[in-house]
Image: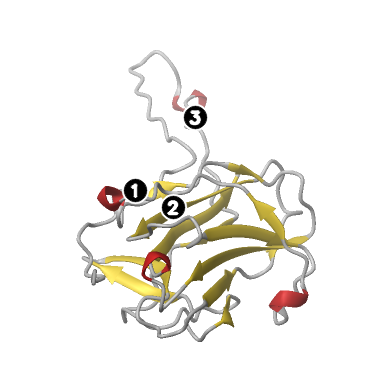
Amino acid sequence: MLTFKKLAMKTIKLVLTGLLGVVSFSGCSPESDIKNPSIEPFAFYQDFTSNNVDGDDINIAGWTNYAEAGTVKWEQGIYSGSKYAEFSGYQSGQASNIGWLISPAINMDLRTGEKFAFDVAQAYVSSSSNSIELFISKDFDGTNVLDATWKSVSFNKPPLDYETRFDFFSSGIIDLSGYTGNIYLAFKVKSSGTNFSLDGTYEIDNIRIFN
């Protein structure tokens, strides 16, 4: 049976959405005429660094960590100083494990042209039935996950092969500019603790919304 000892560090680091240019001038222009491009902070950002205990359930203020099937929830992952959220039904003993990790309400009226991206990895996922999905809701009440209306959102998923286990890949840039009011982002994983082909791990990190 494969174990879940981490064999590789994260390979994808957070890519800043703005580039700070530094330009030098010598005597030909007054200082007041030299302006660096401004970088706006993220409208929303989460990197799961607040907990120092590997394997703890994710428990961050405003976030919802919900087990729809089975008892497994999203957990804190830590390897070689890197931190992330992970979900796996491995050795749960339960035929079905379905876990949701849902963001706090995010106000989309404060900016325009918002984009969304995150980093995602898999480990020992050998079947597409062992899946990770992304959803957005405008009517989630913060408690009743299955009563909310969830819209599926496409993103770039990591390849399902052994050689890329634990390697983080970019989700790609997802356009959120059409949303107004509050939205909630949800990451849903389907797994199994009794089916060998469905007991892999998914990991997410560096969730950010930016202009």
Q: Name the mark nearer the viewer: 1 or 3.
A: 1
Rounded to the nearest whole Å, what is the CA distance between mark 2 and mark 1? 7 Å
Q: How far across and how far down the image is residue 64, in percent?
A: 60, 77
Query: Which quadrant of the view contains residue 199?
Result: bottom left
> How many neighbours does mark 1 have within 10 angstroms: few (below 14), some (14-19), or many (20 or more)?
some
Question: What number is the disc on residue 35?
Answer: 3
At numbered mark 2, what does the secondary structure look like: helix, strand or loop? strand
**Element carrying mark 1:** loop
Circle 3 Cα neighbour tier, 10 Å, few/some/many (<14 / 14–19 / ≥20): few
Classify residue 173 as left or right of residue 93.
Answer: right
In the picture, the quarter occupied by the N terminus is bottom left
Residue placed most toward the observer, 177 or 131: 131
Q: Which mark is residue 119?
A: 2
Q: Residue 98: which quarter of the image?
A: bottom right
Q: Residue at x 47, y 32 (%)?
A: 36
Q: Which numbered disc flags the more N-terminal residue, 2 or 3?
A: 3
Contact between marks 2 and 1 (CB within 8 A): the answer is yes
**In the rendering, which numbered label is found on residue 12?**
1
Q: What's the residue at 49%, 47% (across, down)?
A: 171
- Please name the colour scheme applied to the rendered image: secondary structure
